[in-house]
Image (cartoon, rainbow, N blue to C red):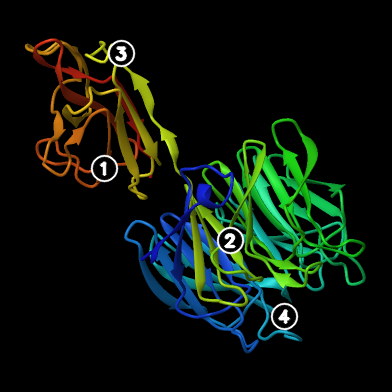
Amino acid sequence: MKLFSLLSVAALSTAPALAQWTIDDLSQARREIAITAVGDTVVFAGGFLPSGISTDRVDFYNTTTEMWTTGMLSVSRGGAAATTVGTKVIIGGGADVTPGGMGLDTVDIWDSATNTWTTSNLSFARFGLTATTVGTKAMFAGGFFTDVVDIYDDATGMWSTALLSVTRGDLAATSVGNLAIFAGGWDGGSNTDVVDIFDDSTGTWTATTLSVPRSRLAATTVGSEAIFAGGGSTVLGDSTAVDIYNDSTGMWTTAALSEPREFLGAATAGGTAIFAGGWNGVAQAYSATADLYTAGTWTTSAISIARWGIAGAGLQNEAYFGGGIVFGRRVDIYTETGPIGTSYCGPAIPNSTGGPSTISANGTTSVGLNNVTLTADGLPPGEFGYFLAGQTQGFLNPPGSQGVICLSGNIGRYNSVADIIQGPTGDLTLDLTSIPVNPPQAAAAGDTWYFQCWHRDTNPTSTSNFTDGVTIVFTP
């Protein structure tokens, strides 16, 4: 389980104040891990040990239980590529040792629905490849040295092949909309700026270029934007370059990381793309920098230990960065939280402060992450109150109260001593596995719950009042 909260991002930078980092550890120290996520599980597969020998170790992290388990690949290897299609995690290629290792064609497939492993083979043995999924197709592209793209179609269970426009390894890939995008790489003599784009809706390939030729870059997608960041550049050394493709407009734009680096990791948490760690060849130093991109704005933060050869994967509102040199067991976990829910039944009737009290919710809508905090503001100072929950809206002025209760039916009350709040403001972190209706009930993905706060008041005699309400639709 997560060891401890490392820091609030806001304590270090100008990133969102409600985001936070926590840390955990893999069962084995290693770098250049193949990483992906499926369902509620993050999978860290293979990698190179500090000696340069590869490992067959697989670490599974269940985000619901916060528990770790381990498994084994069919063949030890590092520098493989991993992606998820449907319920399947597919891990392809890699090398047996580094440096000077032999490329492998082995494919391990873990079906999370059945917890079973099967194997297959790529059409060409290689390492330094990349992988992404678009639609039902898991695509393994490039590597040292080939232009082959191996494609597994989960709808048919069949493999096929295609070709990149340029042979290259150490490229990066991500998918946005109907497009799988493969960018940059090393062609054997120099870095390349080539971008190959596969359109799953038409089955066609097109090509364009990055703003700067580079390899060992990182890629992830947030919203409608596919982002390719950093990498090693022949002319500039390690690069700060960022190329962003917007699927909504079909346009490319550029930006810059806060420092140049290659061998960095990339992942998306909620609405934030994160580029973490890496090797800064200009400064000749490992990097702990994390560049965050949210809604067109860049901010910076840091992972717990500077290292390169780090792997990243996102799952819902969390991003996981595992392994690397120097401390290869470390996993840094970024959790994006923020305002959630929709206000209703407002404004509330003014209380003795002269204004209405309000309720808000922060955290995530994911029942798996179980991270929701309710806040009541504008309560009369010193007056106590408690939160209410239900699955049915209402509108009733109860006898003896000056306010309106916006719930009806089976209403739960957070009125234990530990849950009672006191004005002018109060918070309560919910346990979504046990909402205190009768009988207690767990929130489930797809459920809509309504929350409100009741509080005492003296206005001018003893009475009570309510905040407005907030609606939360929960996700997996």
Q: Is residue 73 left or right of residue 189?
A: left
Q: CA distance from mark 2 to mark 3?
A: 47 Å
The circle on residue 355 is 3
Few, some or many residues within 10 Å of mark 2 (<14, 14–19, 20+) = many
Q: Which residue is mark 1?
A: 430
The three-letter code of the residue at mark 3 reads Gly
Residue at point 76%, 67% (across, down): 170
Q: CA distance from mark 1 to mark 3?
A: 27 Å
Closer to the chain start, of discs 1 and 3, is 3
The three-letter code of the residue at mark 4 reads Gly
For the C terminus, the image quarter is top left
> For the residue labelled by badge 3, is the local secondary structure a helix, a strand or a loop?
loop
Quarter of the image where one finds residue 185: bottom right
**Disc 4 vs disc 3: which is toward the camera?**
3
Q: Which residue is mark 2?
A: 312
Q: Is residue 187 above or below residue 351?
A: below
Point out residue 348 in the picture as x, y percentages from the top left corner.
28, 14
Front residue of this view, candidates 24 and 438: 24
Residue at point 32%, 13% (across, down): 347
Closer to the chain start, of discs 4 and 2, is 4
The reply to whether residue 139 is in sight is no
Q: Which residue is mark 4?
A: 103
Q: CA distance from mark 4 to mark 2?
A: 22 Å
The three-letter code of the residue at mark 1 reads Leu
